[in-house]
Image: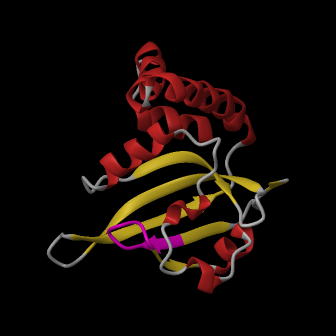
Amino acid sequence: MLRELKEDDFIVSKTDLKGRITYTNKIFIEMSEYRESELLGKPHNILRHPDMPKAIFKHLWETITQKKELFAFIVNKTKESNAYWVYANVTASLDEKGNIIGYYSVRRKPNPKALEVIIPLYKKMIDVEKGSGVDASFKILTDILKEKGVSYDEYIISLQG
């Protein structure tokens, strides 16, 4: 079953440097169908859905470890094997000296029109990943960006509207 965020819902989570969950808000707990105790200390990828290309997560980690923010459309899998889509903003959390001490993510309801583009794109990327790997999968996305003459951020933000 596909679960859906309300227009004014925000999912918030924090992780440590290895991506283990250190904080979740109530909406995250409700959407994920886990109890807070089942989430805290667990890798954030406990929510990884099989319809999510690995190439997107590779790009996410390459971006946020450079202290740059990232926007992405992500489908998550719940404890009960349901799914929900989010429009995510992920950033590094920094200490007073500028060192990364963890990661912070805020997710909200994605634009349904964006998902009409993203879902078939992700399916194509996953199909390529299966046969040719993560880099070949990401090339599908970068080819689209080149064709449109935009950066990854410009493309993703424009889809959300």
Would you say 41 lies left or right of 75 here? left
Query: For the magenta stretch, what is the residue range?
Result: 13-20
In the image, what residue occupies the spot 71% across and 62% down? 78
Q: Is residue 161 visible?
A: no
Q: Is residue 44 above or below residue 86?
A: below
Instruction: Find the residue positioned furthest to the right.
Output: 1
Q: Position of residue 1 (x, y in %)?
A: 85, 53
- Observer-nearest of 6 and 1: 1
Q: Is residue 2 above or below residue 123?
A: below
- Observer-nearest of 87 and 123: 123
In the image, what residue occupies the spot 72% across and 31% down? 116
Instruction: Write down the quadrant of residue 93 in the picture.
Output: bottom left
Q: Position of residue 36 (x, y in %)?
A: 63, 83
Instruction: Find the residue positioned furthest to the front.
Output: 131
Q: Is residue 70 visible?
A: yes
Q: Is 16 one of the magenta-colored residues? A: yes
In the rendered image, which quarter contains the C terminus? Answer: top right
Q: Is residue 141 above or below residue 82?
A: above
Q: Position of residue 87 (x, y in %)?
A: 60, 51
Q: Is 84 one of the magenta-colored residues? A: no
Instruction: Write down the quadrant of residue 64 in the picture.
Output: bottom left
Name the colouring of the figure: secondary structure
Q: Is residue 93 above or below residue 7?
A: below
Would you say 58 lies left or right of 96 here? right
